[in-house]
Image (spheres, rainbow, N blue to C red):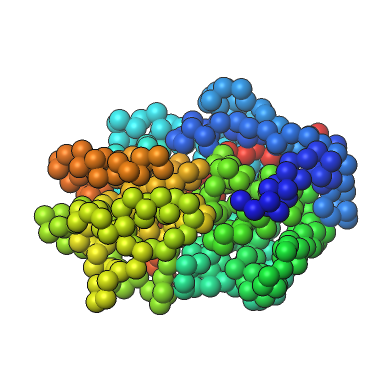
């Protein structure tokens, strides 16, 4: 982490820098759903308060950020019978609720439904006649029943509002090929508006800010500049604009807003707006907990390098019996972890094929498909496209990183289909992999094939694919938040 980034993150945490917090705030509660990722589902606080909002025209916020639960599970009695029915009636009197209260009631009903499914994890409630093309099951999920119920609830009710402020190419646009594919593809899909998007901001559960950090770097950053103020100030102006034009940012202090970025500078850029850094849902490829990534409110975006914008020919591979290479990696000396890996293993062992540059006439994709395990070390930053490359090639990924939260960890049980190797154990990689029995490897490889659907980018999104999984990550974090009406 650069000294400039360290100083900026420190400033974002400084109470004197939190000039956007409102002392008129009342209550935002972060709920513990007990499903299924412990760190996500613990209550947390951001703390601190001061005066003023981002936009002044809508007055002071009537909400703040605080802990409302002290245990790890929301007790049933906190949901009234009216909440469970979606605030339709209370007793014999029909009650009128604001649109925001109705939106919260819909989420309360979904939370109750998901908890019920979670409790029945060992007794599947999913009917074979449900008509679903895919039903999650098996050990690749922390709780398959809860995930399925959560996913179907999301499909039925989740509404996302996309802010229209800003102009392309910095806003409403993004790269659809290269290592930043997932950033552009998601923005484009939300702009198409066929799934989850609502044009009625009052009924939305979350608000998407469709800026592209990749485009900001391309068009605003001057190579060699000692700071990124042009990028950061553009983002700060943008947030000020949406807060000035709409009441929603100040209503929640940004907690029900989300951004998405696959650029390494995504976290750094967001820190120019303290509320965005501390409160909002940030969907980031660079999911580094040592640099402020908070899995309770932030979500990991998979990094996928689509050189030609298509996945044709990338999926699948030979069966395990035809994979003759124990482990494979090829890549440059980017970052300390790769230096250690190449220093120990570069072209030194016929079973552990580690290259800085592949030999002539050797195909990278062929090496992936002929390997049992694919090494996925971090580079300069924690994310690596090799994780998804391994999954596409049906090669068991070996995660080698510090402070990285793998994608969809709140749903997927990575221990069942990947191997985690600490940096200190890089010299022992062969011993670790040789110690995995053939039976265990075959199970892991089969599970890699099963989990593959969740990482596939489709031209038109399909159920349970990458686009839907990203939205589900945002949905879970919104479920973990309750916005209370002013009193």
98 vs 154, left or right, is right
Q: Is residue 61 visible?
A: no
Q: Residue at x 80, y 59 (%)?
A: 240
Query: Can I make out residue 23 in this image?
Result: yes
**Above or below 67: residue 226:** below
> In front here: 220 or 259?
220
Q: Position of residue 461 (x, y in %)?
A: 42, 65
Would residue 332 appear left or right of 104 to someone viewing this image? Answer: left
Quarter of the image for residue 213 reads: bottom right
* Foreground residue among 75 and 278: 278
What residue is drawn where x is 40% and y is 39%? 424
Task: Say which residue appears at 88% left-offset and 53% top-offset.
Answer: 56
Residue 301, placed above or below residue 31? below
Identify the residue at image location x=63%, y=74%: 218
Question: Which residue is outermost to the left?
Answer: 321
Query: How far across and how far down the image is residue 275, in percent?
Result: 73, 47
Q: Quadrant of residue 16?
A: top right
Give the quadrant of residue 395.
bottom left
Q: Is residue 75 above or below residue 476?
A: above
Figure check: 383 above or below 225: above
- Quarter in which the C terminus is drawn: top right
Q: Could you tell me residue 252's position as x and y percent?
A: 73, 45
């Amino acid at each position: 982490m650069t000294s400039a980034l360290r100083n900026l993150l420190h400033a974002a945490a400084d109470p004197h820098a939190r000039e956007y917090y409102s002392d008129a705030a009342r209550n935002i509660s972060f709920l513990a759903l007990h499903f299924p990722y412990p760190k996500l589902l613990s209550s947390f606080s951001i703390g601190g308060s001061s005066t003023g909002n981002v936009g002044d025209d809508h007055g002071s916020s009537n909400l703040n950020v605080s802990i409302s639960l002290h245990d790890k599970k929301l007790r049933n009695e906190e949901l009234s019978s009216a909440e469970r029915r979606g605030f339709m009636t209370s007793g014999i009197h029909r009650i009128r609720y604001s649109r925001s209260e109705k939106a919260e009631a819909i989420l309360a009903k979904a939370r109750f439904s998901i908890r019920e499914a979670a409790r029945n994890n060992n007794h599947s409630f999913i009917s074979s006649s449900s008509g679903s093309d895919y039903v999650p099951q098996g050990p690749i999920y922390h709780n398959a029943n809860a995930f399925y119920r959560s996913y179907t609830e999301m499909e039925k009710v989740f509404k996302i509002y996309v802010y229209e402020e800003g102009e392309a190419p910095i806003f409403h646009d993004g790269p659809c090929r290269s290592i930043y594919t997932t950033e552009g593809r998601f923005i484009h899909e939300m702009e198409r508006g066929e799934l989850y998007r609502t044009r009625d901001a009052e009924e939305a559960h979350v608000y998407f800010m469709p800026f592209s950090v990749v485009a900001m770097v391309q068009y605003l950053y001057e190579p060699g500049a000692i700071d990124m103020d042009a990028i950061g100030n553009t983002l700060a102006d943008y947030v000020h604009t949406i807060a000035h034009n709409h009441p929603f940012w100040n209503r929640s202090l940004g907690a029900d807003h989300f951004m998405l970025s696959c650029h390494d500078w995504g976290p750094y850029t967001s820190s120019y707006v303290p509320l965005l850094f501390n409160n909002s849902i940030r969907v980031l490829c660079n999911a580094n907990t040592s640099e402020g990534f908070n899995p309770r409110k932030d979500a990991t975006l998979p990094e996928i390098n689509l050189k030609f914008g298509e996945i044709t020919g990338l999926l699948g591979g030979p069966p395990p019996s035809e994979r003759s290479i124990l482990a494979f990696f090829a890549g440059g000396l980017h970052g300390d972890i790769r230096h250690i890996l190449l220093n120990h293993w570069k072209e030194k062992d016929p079973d552990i094929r580690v290259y800085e540059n592949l030999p002539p006439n050797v195909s990278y994709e062929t090496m992936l498909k002929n390997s049992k395990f694919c090494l996925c070390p971090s580079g300069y930053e924690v994310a690596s496209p090799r994780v998804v490359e391994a999954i596409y090639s049906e090669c068991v990924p070996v995660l080698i990183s510090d402070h990285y939260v793998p994608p969809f960890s709140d749903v997927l049980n990575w221990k069942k289909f990947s191997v985690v190797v600490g940096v200190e154990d890089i010299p022992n990689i062969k011993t670790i992999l040789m110690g995995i029995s053939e039976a265990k490897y075959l199970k892991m490889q089969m599970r890699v094939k099963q989990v593959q659907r969740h990482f596939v980018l489709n031209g038109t999104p399909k159920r349970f694919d990458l686009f839907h999984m990203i939205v589900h990550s945002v949905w879970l974090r919104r479920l973990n938040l309750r916005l209370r009406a002013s009193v």
